[in-house]
Image: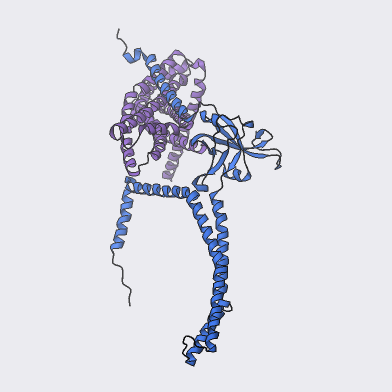
Amino acid sequence: MKAVTYIWKGVGSWFVLFIERKLYVVGALLECGLTAIRPSSWSPPVRNCLTHQILVSGVRALPFTLLIAVSFSFAVYLHCNLWLTLTGKPEWLVPALRASLLREAGPLLATFVVMCISVPAIMAEMVNIQLNGELAQLQAKGQNTFGLVVMPRMIGLSIAIFCLSIFLNVTVFLCLEAWFLFFSPEILNIVNVFHSFMMGLKPADFLSVFLRAVIIGNMIGAICANEARNVRAVSTEAPTLVGRAMLRCLWAAVSVTFIVSIALRVSA
Amino acid sequence: MVEKPFQLRYLNSIAAAFLLCAVFLLALVIFLTGREQGWFEKSKVFYVDLTPKAADVIRAGADVFLLGNRIGTVKRIGFRKGKNVVPFPSVLRSDAIQPTAVLYLKGNYVRLIGQGSVATLRQSLGGFGSGFFDLTVRINSDLLVDNTIPLELEPSAKEEFAEIVKPAIAAAEQALTRISALAAEDSELSRGVASFASVTKGLEESGVFVAQGTEAPEFRQMIEKIRAAAGSIDDVVTKRIGPAVDHIGGTAKSADSLISKDLRGALQDVRKAMADLDIDLAAAQHHWLLRSQVKQVQEERARKLAEPTPRPRR
């Protein structure tokens, strides 16, 4: 009987925590939107925080992202080469590449890069703020802590993911053309590939990249804030929280990618 | 005082440059895409009044071609009430409304459309595929009245083929009926043959040797009967079966010319599609995702073929 009670208690507390986390993320997304549209929210410290976040998540991640784009494009080239050798039909390959590479893989890779670079940094920063009592002080002063600490990071992450997605997609496309030009110009005419890519792009592709970047960036910021809020008094909790935040961010990124893909496919 | 690192000293400038580069790249991609797809070119609206048959074939989103170039699409199928096009008419009287295809055309080619231009409704796959408009060029001609392009229906190869084949089938049925009538027991041919057989049998039984110039009455009678039977057969063949066969032959020729002229395109398309499918299947079998499965099936098939087939017991 006691065991059953423990199990019910465990399931119930897990469920409450699950709902609480989801509600926090949804609430944070709404709050971020409402705070960001108010010009008074953009005080100099907030602007500075946003710029700093763009620097950390975007500019510093750029070389690594470009490196990934180059190596990824080579892997894609090898696969394309195999398929073109077998089928000899580039006109079938290009639409598939456009859909899978530019629309799906590009934003997701950029998200992973930003997550790897930013989530530990943001978590460490927020845990320290929480443990040092800085948040409590700000709240005591009547400051909007969400607008000061969380909102610029959420928006900075969104901007970083969006910009990195563009850099990554453009680099992958250019590198792919370069690999074909250097290694197997007889298989694929790069002018035709360029024309095909451009003819196939639709406004929904741009919308897809934008939506993913905005939603996933905001969610990563909200999840980090939610996890950092749970730290109480011991700084050794931080690594566990970072790990959990990474997993939650990964799950959020994959879920949002999936949902946006389905939504755009249904609306097309 | 320790100087700040470079990135923090120029924090705002670096972040702005990063953002501007991304925005510039995005704008460039959008511009190139728009230029390729003609997003920035102004669309001109044309109308094609549809017959009920054409309205069944054409759909919104169908392509419009001029000189082999795709210059636009059918935006929607609406109804024309006087000069205005409405999504759905308030009055549903057949004399008051006219189904109309609204075409959105772009580019310089639009200037080649004028008085005398015709929108021919064609169907891909030799009449079995989706419909599209093919416009004819009129250079230095006057502008169209109300931007309305007259419709021309391409004769459907499918229907033409059916129209040709239908009489051929009727003729073949008629010929078959006549042939079966000839083969019936009470027909002239059957009676002639039976009579010939009886005469021959009588001659054999009587043991009369029939030589040239013999004036035997049975022999004369027999010759007459044979002539009558031959005449009957000749009559049937030349007057009845002959025209029927000629008709079938003519029909087959016209069907053949139709096939060679119109359906050849469809057959070529189908053949091309089959070849593509074949290539795809071969390629898919080499892919790492399917390779092992294909190999497994092939091995099973080879094992079955290698097994000795059991001999049936006697």
Front in this rendered view, residue B112 or B51: B112
Relative to residue B310, is residue B138 depicted above or below?
Answer: above
In the rendered image of the structure, the colour used to display chain A is: purple
Residue displayed at 46% across by 27% down: B35
Residue displayed at 70% across by 38% down: B90
- For this orientation, the residue located farthest to the top is B1
Front in this rendered view, residue B237 or A208: B237
Q: Position of residue B225 (x, y in %)?
A: 55, 82
Front in this rendered view, residue A9 or B51: B51
Relative to residue B21, is residue B91 depicted above or below?
Answer: below
Q: Quadrant of residue A71?
A: top left
Q: Position of residue B231 (x, y in %)?
A: 55, 75
Residue displayed at 31% across by 62% down: B304
Front in this rendered view, residue B263 or B86: B263
Q: Quadrant of residue A167?
A: top left
- For this orientation, the residue located farthest to the front is B213
Q: Is residue B189 visible?
A: yes
**Colour-to-chain, blue:** B
Position of B185 compared to B25: left or right? right
